[in-house]
Image (tube, rainbow, N blue to C red):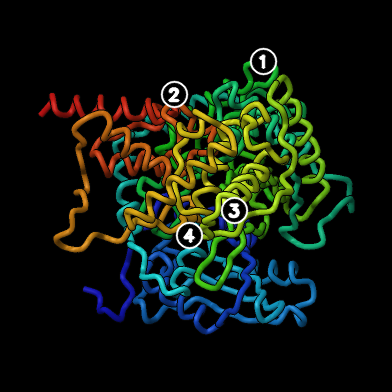
């Protein structure tokens, strides 16, 4: 039995085994680092921030792990809370030279995987009230969503919030093992058949001429912006086809792959978030799986539907790992120059839901910006959607010519995928943003703030009695407007209320009615800022409270619908109408996992991912929950 002061052995997860193997294979110590920066404004106490990071590290066993080589497998040791401390540095920007290069160097600095903590924080001071915070770790410890949660949790602790609830990572490891045992190798057999044949590398990824475009430093990335106009056009096309915006991006990638020399079996890697709980836990829950891009020529006008089908196919057969697939695909890709085997893809695509800026006491944190510390086995593409525009971060090992050429081709392909859309493109928003947390009393003040929110979404002012939809608004814009209203005024206007009379004057009246109602009922609710992909769970109710049990069974359809609406609103940050599409309102696969995990926790029934993908609306989800409850009651 281990002493409390001695490290305890823990099982390695599937994802940890994968990253352990590829870290040793690629040879670049920083190849599998995960890093990001956030701009902090406001008075900041570095020692208080250090203590907050130490507290978070003590709360999460996953941040206190060391990794050791044991016969080709990683051996994991969890260290006691008092012995593990993250690296913490404070530097003045004036002495750092190029700030971007300085932070990249710190992000790429190797971790000692045998040490008790694989976490580094670097605070770069530009002024007493302006800093950049770098958070860096290793993919053995965290994935991208967890890094965003780490930022949120650390700054929350800095602001005095109590510790977040923790779901042990070991529980997830056990569930993954059980899932694979139940699968019985069926997923691997599926991929064995899928890889029956060879894939060809993309010509766009061929090495450029000697000395052409060599990047100045490892991990150098190029960023491409899909502006508001193109994003709106692409989103309209995806809405028409009932697919997600990310599916539209993958369809464009299929076009580039085909024209770059790929075949129908061209494969890219796609990290799949496997969180089956909404608990605020830090760890690596991301399994990287192959995604067979559809043959763009064969798919023709149904390219978006074909892309959606292969995306669902990957999700359906995900009870496997990269290490399981290596023997299956050994002949599907060429070897590297040093004859070492490569992973079964040359391109890695990752979707990220951008974290909105948030306030933590007197400190304001900007959106987390990912840092590429070096591509792994080819081209890395990160798809970041902030609801207004999309940023594509492309990185390639040591060369910007490849990533630049590929980015240009991808932007052109996105334009082609969006062709045929009849929805107007929304220009860039230039309107002023109303200050958070203010509650105007005079009707003129409410009207002015409502007008500013709508103008920000539409990109142009709207008259008091003009129709939001006739001015080019859509359901995604409605969600953005109502989320802005809730942040500004602290009141919740339902989507269906706005649909009835979609004018600024009607919205102003409704805001005033809700404010008046709340003042009289003395139930003022603070503005909500959804700052994370996986919402932090509420604190447990004290003994004797009237909080519902972990598994509640509502008596009628109205109660089920209300609970379903609340879960979806928590994930999206804004209410959704009964027949509105979850993906068209900005949802993604990570959000789906969170929604279904909460549904299972609340109702005790399991809705499958593919069922939600078929009809991603609150009404359909409500019906499916009722069907499952009825089925279970009949079996009982």
Distance Cα–Cα, label 1 vs label 3: 49 Å
Look at the numbered disc 2 and give the secondary structure of its residue. helix
Disc 1: which residue: 301
Where is residue 84 drawn, in percent x and y?
42, 77
Asked whether residue 250 appears in the rendered view, the answer is no
Query: Label 2 vs label 1: CA separation?
Result: 20 Å
Judged from the image, the secondary structure of the residue bearing numbered disc 1 is: helix
Compare residues 585 and 433 and report the one nearer the observer: 433
For marks 1 and 3, the one nearer the N-term is 1
Q: Earlier in the sequence, mark 3 or mark 4?
A: 4
565 versus 192 height, above or below: below
Identify the residue at horizontal 46%, vertical 73% (top origin).
159
Above or below 492: residue 95:
below
Q: What residue appears at the point 45 percent right and 35 percent down from the top-left corner? A: 576
Distance (Cα) linking label 4 and label 1: 40 Å
Q: Earlier in the sequence, mark 3 or mark 2?
A: 3
**Label of residue 445 in the image:** 3
Q: Are marks 4 and 1 in contact (CB under 8 Å)?
A: no
- Structural distance between the alpha carbons of marks 3 and 4: 36 Å
Q: Which mark is residue 149?
A: 4
Inter-mark Cα distance, 3 to 2? 44 Å
């Amino acid at each position: 039995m281990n002493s409390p002061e001695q490290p305890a052995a823990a099982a390695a997860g599937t994802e940890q085994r994968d990253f352990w193997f590829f870290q040793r294979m690629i040879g670049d110590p920083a190849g599998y680092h995960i890093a990001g920066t956030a701009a902090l404004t406001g008075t900041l106490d570095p020692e208080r921030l250090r203590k907050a990071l130490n507290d978070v590290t003590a709360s999460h066993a996953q941040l206190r792990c060391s990794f050791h080589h044991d016969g080709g497998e990683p051996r994991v040791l969890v260290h006691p809370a008092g012995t593990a401390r993250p690296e913490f540095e404070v530097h003045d920007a004036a002495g750092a030279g190029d700030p971007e290069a300085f932070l990249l160097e710190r992000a790429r600095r190797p971790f000692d995987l045998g040490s008790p903590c694989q976490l580094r924080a670097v605070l770069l001071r530009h002024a007493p009230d302006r800093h950049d915070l770098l958070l860096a770790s290793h993919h053995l410890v965290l994935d991208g969503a967890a890094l965003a949660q780490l930022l949120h949790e650390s700054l929350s602790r800095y602001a005095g919030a109590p510790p977040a609830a923790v779901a042990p990572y070991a529980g997830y490891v056990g569930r993954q093992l059980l899932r694979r045992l139940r699968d019985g190798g069926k997923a691997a057999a599926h991929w064995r058949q899928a890889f029956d044949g060879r894939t060809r590398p993309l010509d766009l990824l061929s090495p450029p001429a000697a000395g052409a475009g060599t990047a100045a430093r490892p991990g150098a990335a190029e960023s491409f912006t899909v502006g508001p106009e193109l994003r709106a056009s692409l989103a309209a096309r995806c809405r028409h086809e009932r697919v997600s915006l990310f599916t539209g991006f993958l369809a464009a990638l299929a076009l580039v792959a085909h024209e770059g020399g790929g075949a129908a079996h061209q494969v890219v890697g796609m990290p799949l978030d496997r969180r089956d709980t909404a608990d605020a836990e830090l760890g690596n829950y991301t399994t990287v799986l192959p995604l067979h891009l559809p043959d763009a020529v064969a798919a023709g006008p149904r390219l978006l539907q074909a892309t959606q089908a292969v995306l669902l196919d990957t999700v359906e057969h995900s009870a496997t790992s990269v290490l399981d697939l290596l023997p299956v695909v050994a002949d599907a890709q060429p070897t590297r120059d040093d004859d070492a085997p490569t992973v079964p893809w040359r391109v890695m695509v990752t979707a990220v839901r951008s974290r909105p800026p948030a306030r933590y006491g007197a400190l304001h944190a900007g959106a987390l910006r990912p840092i590429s510390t070096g591509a792994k086995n080819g081209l890395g593409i990160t798809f970041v959607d902030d609801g207004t525009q999309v940023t594509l971060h492309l990185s390639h090992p040591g060369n910007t010519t490849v990533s630049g050429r590929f980015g240009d081709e991808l932007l052109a392909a996105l334009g082609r995928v969006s062709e045929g859309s009849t929805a107007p493109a929304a220009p860039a928003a230039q309107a002023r943003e109303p200050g958070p947390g203010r509650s105007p009393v005079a009707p003129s003040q409410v009207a002015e703030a409502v007008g500013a929110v709508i103008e920000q979404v539409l990109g142009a002012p709207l008259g008091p009695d003009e129709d939001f939809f006739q001015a080019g608004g859509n359901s995604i814009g409605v969600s953005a407007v109502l989320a802005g209203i809730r942040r500004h005024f602290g009141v919740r206007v339902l989507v269906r209320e706005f649909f009835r009379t979609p004018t600024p004057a009607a919205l102003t009246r409704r805001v005033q009615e809700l404010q008046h109602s709340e003042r009289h009922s003395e139930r003022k609710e603070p503005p909500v800022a959804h700052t994370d992909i996986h919402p932090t769970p509420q604190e447990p109710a004290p003994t004797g409270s009237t909080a519902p049990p972990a598994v509640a069974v509502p008596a009628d359809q109205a109660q089920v619908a209300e609970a379903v609406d609340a879960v979806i609103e928590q994930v999206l940050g804004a209410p959704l109408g009964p027949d509105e599409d979850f993906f068209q309102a900005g949802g993604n696969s990570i959000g789906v996992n969170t929604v279904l995990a909460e549904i299972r926790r609340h109702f005790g029934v399991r809705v499958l991912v593919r069922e939600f993908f078929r009809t991603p609306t609150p009404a359909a989800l409500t019906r499916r929950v009722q069907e499952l409850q009825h089925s279970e009651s009949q079996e009982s």
